[in-house]
Image (spheres, rainbow, N blue to C red):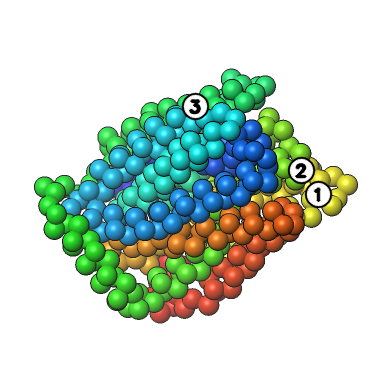
């Protein structure tokens, strides 16, 4: 049973509901619908829209990279983890709703609202992730992480299906209205997390916590060599997570611009990918606990490389949309397990007294250079084509796979767990 060794089953289910609550933001706004809507409707043209959207992803990434270690340290020292989780969730929801207002030509307004929403989404995820090791013994962490990711993709599936049911024509006004659905969805379904997930007792805020956070961050940076495996893993994940971020940020744009998908087709693609992602997350949660997290991550990276190559070749085939569909389904199957396994591996190799702070670095490694992939994609596509630009994703996956397999996990004496 998934919950057999959990201290509080209601608490872990409530924690998992946060993935259910925030997944529609990634699916609808970042990946499949609003990104394509921005490039085709709001921006002056698709070429400039792609570059602007890539820049917005870059700005978000840099902001999260700077904030997450500092706020993580403050959370450790002052017991403000849940406060930050609630705060950033509400900011994300509000600015998701405000994306209803930008229309054709309102580029600055749209990008400003999106950046604020996206930064808040990522910061909320940082603090949510840091709870994982609190709930269960390490041998069950794969199932728990996989369950949460699977529940998240199920939430994305329902939100996408509901959007397509309510707005089958997918007119510009419909797409704008769907942003309201995303914000309300996040507000409602994050409530169980806020109510039933416990936390350390919050101390009265003191300015010294801010000072202490910088000292703690400095000490962590200075002594990071003492956590060599953690550091090496964060570097490897930096590359392959950057590839995933590029797919998330520009996948819908690629489908619409390079393969002539309509908004309705992109929405349908999103539904199918969420089904695949949910299946992959649940299935690989068990597979991880059988074959180990290292082998599982390797499998996901190899399949992701193959799938991206198929997406590059799709426009050159006689059945471009069908090939892209197959590629997308494979990517969907691997996205959940890759992220889930990365999260569970991080919880296994991180000292318990450093959870919030190191999960801040976990976010840092995922965001520190994550502007590079989208930025290169936008730059290369402006000179050549989106097909050629997609090779950036393959390159990042390959580097991540290579660096990941150079890590000496045996030094941690966790062979039975990794």
Q: Secondary structure at mark 1?
A: helix
> Foreground residue, 343 or 209?
209
Left of 221 or right of it: where is 241? Answer: right
Q: CA distance from mark 1 to mark 2?
A: 7 Å
For the residues carrying marks 3 and 2, which lies nearer the camera in this image?
A: 3
- The residue drawn where x is 41% and y is 47% is 119
Query: Residue 315 shows which numbered tag?
Result: 1
Left of 100 or right of it: where is 398? Answer: right
> Foreground residue, 249 or 224?
249
Q: Secondary structure at mark 2?
A: loop
- The answer to whether residue 395 of the structure is visible from this angle is yes
| Category of crowding for the residue at label 2, using alpha-carbon neighbours closer than 10 angstroms: few (below 14), some (14–19), many (at least 20) | some
The x and y percentages for residue 236 are 51, 69
- The answer to whether residue 19 of the structure is visible from this angle is no
| Category of crowding for the residue at label 1, using alpha-carbon neighbours closer than 10 angstroms: few (below 14), some (14–19), many (at least 20) | some
Query: Residue 101 shows which numbered tag?
Result: 3
Specify the quadrant of the image occupied by residue 120: top left
The x and y percentages for residue 386 are 71, 52
Looking at the image, do the residues carrying marks 3 and 1 touch, with CB atoms under 8 Å apart? no
- The residue drawn where x is 39% and y is 77% is 228
Residue 380 against residue 274 in the figure, above or below = below
């Amino acid at each position: 049973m998934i919950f057999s060794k959990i201290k509080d089953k209601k608490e872990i289910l409530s924690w998992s509901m946060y993935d259910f609550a925030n997944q529609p933001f990634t699916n609808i706004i970042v990946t499949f619908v609003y990104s394509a809507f921005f490039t085709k409707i709001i921006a002056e043209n698709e070429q400039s829209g792609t570059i602007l959207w890539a820049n917005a992803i870059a700005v978000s990434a840099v902001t999260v990279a700077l904030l997450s270690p500092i706020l993580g340290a403050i959370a450790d020292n002052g017991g403000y983890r849940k406060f930050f989780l609630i705060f950033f969730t509400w900011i994300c929801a509000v600015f998701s709703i405000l994306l209803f207002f930008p229309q054709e030509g309102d580029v600055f307004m749209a990008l400003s609202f999106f950046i604020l929403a996206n930064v808040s989404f990522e910061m909320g995820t940082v603090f949510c992730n840091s709870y994982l090791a609190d709930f269960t013994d390490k041998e069950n962490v794969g199932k728990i992480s996989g369950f949460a990711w699977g529940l998240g993709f199920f939430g994305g599936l329902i939100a996408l299906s509901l959007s397509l049911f309510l707005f089958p024509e997918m007119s510009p006004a419909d797409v704008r209205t769907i942003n309201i659905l995303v914000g309300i969805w996040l507000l409602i379904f994050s409530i169980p997390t806020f109510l039933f997930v416990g936390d350390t007792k919050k101390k009265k805020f003191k300015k010294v916590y801010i000072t202490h956070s910088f000292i703690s961050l400095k000490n962590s940076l200075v002594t990071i060599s003492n956590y060599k495996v953690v550091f090496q893993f964060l570097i490897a994940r930096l590359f392959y997570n950057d590839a995933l971020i590029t797919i998330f940020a520009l996948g819908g744009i690629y489908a619409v611009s390079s393969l002539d998908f309509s908004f309705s087709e992109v929405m349908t693609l999103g539904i199918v990918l969420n089904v695949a992602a949910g299946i992959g997350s649940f299935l690989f949660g068990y597979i991880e606990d059988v074959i180990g997290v290292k082998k599982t991550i390797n499998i996901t990276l190899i399949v992701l490389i193959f799938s991206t190559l198929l997406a590059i070749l799709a426009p050159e085939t006689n059945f471009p949309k069908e090939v892209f569909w197959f590629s997308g389904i494979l990517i969907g199957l691997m996205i959940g397990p890759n992220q889930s396994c990365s999260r569970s591996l991080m919880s296994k190799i991180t000292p318990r007294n450093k959870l919030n702070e190191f999960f801040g670095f976990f976010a840092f490694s995922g965001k520190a250079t994550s502007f590079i992939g989208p930025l290169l994609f936008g730059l290369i596509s402006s000179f050549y084509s989106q097909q050629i630009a997609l090779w950036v994703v393959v390159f990042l996956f390959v580097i991540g796979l290579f660096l990941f397999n150079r890590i000496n996990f045996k030094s941690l004496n966790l062979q039975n767990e990794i």
